[in-house]
Amino acid sequence: MADNRSEEEVLDSILGNLHSQTGDEAGIEGSIEESILEDFRTSVDPKIVDAGWGFETAKSVEHGKTDQSLLNHVRNGVFVLAQMNDVVRSLGGYTLDEADLRAAIALFTIHDIHKLDPERDADPNSRFDIPTEEVQRYVDKFGLADFAPDLTPKDFRSCAIDHHDDWTANHDQTTRRFDDLRPFVRVADGLASCDTPEAATDGSVQTAIDRAYLKSDFELRRHVLDDVKGILTNLLNSAISECLGAFEYHPLAIYQDGCVYLASEEAERPELDQNLVKEIIDQLKENVQQSHPAFSSPSDLRSNLSTRYAKDFYGINDQDFFYAGSDTVLAAVAQESISDADPNDEPTENMAETMQELEKYIPSDIERSRRPVGLARFVYTVRRSFVDPIISDSESRLEATCDILSVSDEILEGLLAASEDDEDDEVDLSLTAGGRWDYAYGIGQFLLDEGLTDPVDLKKRASSGLSRYDENWADIVEESHAGNLRSELAAYVSDVVSIDGRPLPASDNELSDPFEEYHSTRRGKTCVLCNRGTTSTRKSDLEAPKSLTTLQAGYSNHVPVNAGKPDDLLACIPCQIELSLRETGASEREGGRLFVHLVPDYFYTPLSWRSYSDVMSQFSGESKIELGRLAEAVLWLTGDLDVADVDGFESALFDTDTGRQMAEMLDQGFDPGSQFGARTLGYYKPEDNETEFQFFGVYVGLAVAAYAGLRVYVSESPIPDIKGRDFRSYARIGAGFTQVHDFYGSEIRLSELASRLRAASALIKLGYGTERNDALFAKFLRVTRNQLLPGSHLLKRIAQADDSSDARYLLEEARVLDQETGIESTTSETQTSNE
């Protein structure tokens, strides 16, 4: 399909140009800063993308820094400078007016152009000898003269040659206009260069702020998390930020594992005690309940229920009681049961036999359809999850359930008689074998005879009965299922949160030591996902059902010596909460997925977080990716823009016509305003073999990272085992990807990103040259390992397979693959290693 858009429109979609805001905005909506940023986003940012700055390095591993593209360096500085201006206004300090803020942003945009000439930049004596004509080319290319019309060419050149605090800069060749704005450019550059909250709050950045705001006493402060999960991390970041807001901490930058704030030096610091921990947990719970419609909507919460067909009840994640409350969970169970009560569907043979046996004890016939089955599942679930917590151990569960559901005395007497026979070994009746509770069929038929086929009425019958038993039933039920969540979360927060470099005090409930637990018999109480301990004394509290984790126990089918079955998968409460939140936010929940953990490069601001959220929200369960067109778009983007006519990068990532569903964000539906910091993409393309699945999974991960302007860690683990600060390269591929490590490498530097994407794209185009069979890519990857000219080899095979009509269109792809992975790159790598 030809691309009918203009080149500018196509380029505007590439590499995550920040989308305009919709709905309510935080912070600077409708302000001067918002207006300026919108103008920058629409008129300047696309042209920076056009210039290829998404693949140019501002900071690099080669120079001992964490990889950061020049595009993201500029974006970070521009957004944080605008955020700073707004925060300073809130604190009563001096702010830049519209003309000055526009000028500072325009100057910052071209401040690092010396890095685009590596040869000159390598010589400190000539690094900043940049002619005015060269600076002006970028000014014209990016439209900066229109963006900041009061700046002159000499002002722009002054920034290019003198913004650095370096002896090699030309301090004597600057204009007064630039000199006035230089302190603010330095603030933007200082913050944009900080890859951690600790770096952002060190002395050098604070000094830059002190110089820019001479008459004000502002101080950078921070909070940091020592652990990253995903949605839980984001909600915790938000909860801490809201608690610190009471102390006049104003957020400036959002990192994956913390936030940086600006405050007055006189602002009080919070007292770090268990009261603060309690406030954070309370705020976290409130944020969770408000973060997603499912936690206030029974119809949405239904999707979190899992039907246990062998026992005929609904499995409920304990975390959902914490998120949504007992009343909402009960309503969701009622809705699910009515949806299962299909009058046109017949019961199974075992169900029909049980119904026939029960009819001997109760004065009514049980309908041979799925209607009583659906209601029976409701009854058994109510008994297990709602009745059991509020009755004493000495009370009869059957009698209590019948009382709560207002079952007639005749039905109760019959069911009690059946229970007596069920306990009598001489009577051939089995209603509770294997964990079943088949009395529910009799109670379900009674409810059906009562006309309770509306979920609202059904839920009301149960809640009214529970209230008769105990008016505080909802709190009791929540405490029963989720009471340990609060204590575990309190211990977790105390363990991982630090504020202004000071850790929170240890919890009264001490976490178990992972090292000591590891040596205990058949593995102790240690989470297999994050290796954390627990406050619980029971190992069973960590046992997570496969319906929640989607993972096999221990990641393998290995059965320990003297064990009858594999160990249950152990997941700490914070990891269980994270997985249950994802269960709410994702539509694809099967096992066998890869996880693309996206890391900011280096941070978001409150405004840019919402913009990135708008971009990433497009990866919904309904979105589709067309891999062939994506490969073509990548080759076009990283090559010569004038030689190809293809659809845009974005249209290939979101191709609703011919694409395939294979990737989605795991936090769909969550309010971006209630959580911020980390993003995770699930990859679930149908698998032909492990090699092709991993190859395309990594490719999609790299392409999405390039599109969004984010760093990335691709892993088989749903919980990232490393944080963004733990690796410096642009991309990292986790363990378990042995089939594709030879092609991609385990770490991909920003300087190598374009090469790796081009090589993979060329291989995809050649692999799809004759037929679209993903399974063949295991063979194609062997070709890249074994052949000195893999592109030529594959092109020859394509030519032999047909009359060469397809092969002639793939000459460029073959050349690219040879160039990036063939003899030339092999020779180059050999020479480098020999040196």
Image: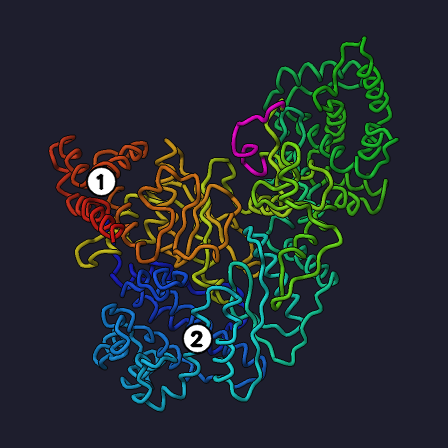
The answer to which of 259 and 475 lies nearer the viewer is: 259
| Quarter of the image where the C terminus is located | bottom left
Quadrant location of residue 7? bottom left
Q: Which residue is mark 2?
A: 188
Residue 300 in view in this figure: no
**Callout 1 amino acid:** Leu
**Callout 2 amino acid:** Ala
Q: Earlier in the sequence, mark 1 or mark 2?
A: 2
Horizontal relation, residue 305 to residue 112: left or right: right
Circle 2 SS class: helix
Horizontal relation, residue 69 to residue 826: left or right: right
Which mark is drawn over residue 766?
A: 1
Task: Please determine whether, in this image, residue 120 is positioned above or below residue 446.
Answer: below
Q: How many marks?
A: 2
The answer to which of 16 and 120 lies nearer the viewer is: 120
The answer to which of 661 and 359 lies nearer the viewer is: 661
